[in-house]
Image (spheres, rainbow, N blue to C red):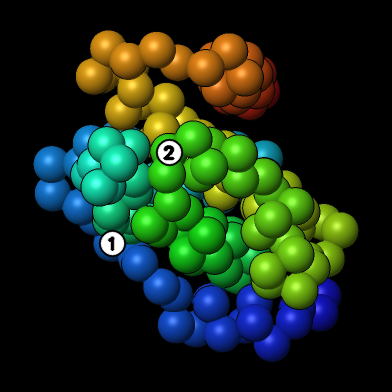
Amino acid sequence: MSYSQLVIDHFNNPLNQGQIKNPDGVGEVGNLTCGDVMKIYIKIEKDAEGDEIISQIKFETFGCVAAIASSSMITELAKGQKLSKAMEIQNEDVMDQLGDLPQPKIHCSVLAADALAEAIYDHLFKTKQEIPEKLQKRHQHIMRVQAAFEEI
């Protein structure tokens, strides 16, 4: 399996790896078929206009080269972004930035995007804010997929 140099760089020197104490949101997803598990932690602050932004973001990932690189890249894409923009980040954005992933490893970018979405969902839920319908549907889909893997 061949990886881009950027994937190798993010694997060897992952950015934003670790935990955040007292995070404002946590997203955890996994794929029991391949064994990858990702956890993303976010801290939220308000910018000058009063919009919520991701001021800090970290990840912990147990997984392969592509899983760690995807986790590292998603944190770079989301850091400093308004929540409204960060919740729109998709796995294709991760793959584009990494210079693509081999076909069997695309699911790693999906897991990374899902973990970020779950962290944002967790923050909005805990703070009793309105959760956009698109994010609600994504959360429900993620929960269905997680439940299906647990049945296997």
Residue at point 60%, 39% (across, down): 88
Give whichever of discs 1 and 2 has the lower sequence position: 1
**What is the quadrant of residue 55 in the picture?**
bottom left
| Front-most of residues 63 and 115 | 115
Q: Which residue is mark 2?
A: 83
Residue 102 in view, yes or no: yes
Residue 28 in view, yes or no: no
Return the residue found at the far right.
103
Q: Nearer the viewer, mark 1 or mark 2?
A: 2
**Residue 18, labelled with which disc?**
1
Residue 93: image location, x then y, percent: 69, 55
Residue at point 27%, 47% (across, down): 47
Residue at point 34%, 48% (across, down): 54
Residue 52: image location, x then y, percent: 32, 38
Q: CA distance from mark 1 to mark 2?
A: 21 Å
Secondary element at tag 2 = helix
Residue 45: image location, x then y, percent: 22, 44
Is 35 situated left or right of 61 in this image? right
Quarter holding the N terminus is bottom right
Q: Amino acid at mark 1?
A: Gly
Residue at point 75%, 52% (across, down): 92
* Residue 52 sits above or below residue 98 on the image: above
Q: Residues within 10 Å of mark 1 (few under 14, many from 20)?
A: some
Is 123 situated left or right of 133 in this image? left
Q: Amino acid at mark 2?
A: Leu
Is 139 situated left or right of 95 in this image? left
| Front-most of residues 128 and 145 | 128
| Front-most of residues 23 and 104 | 23
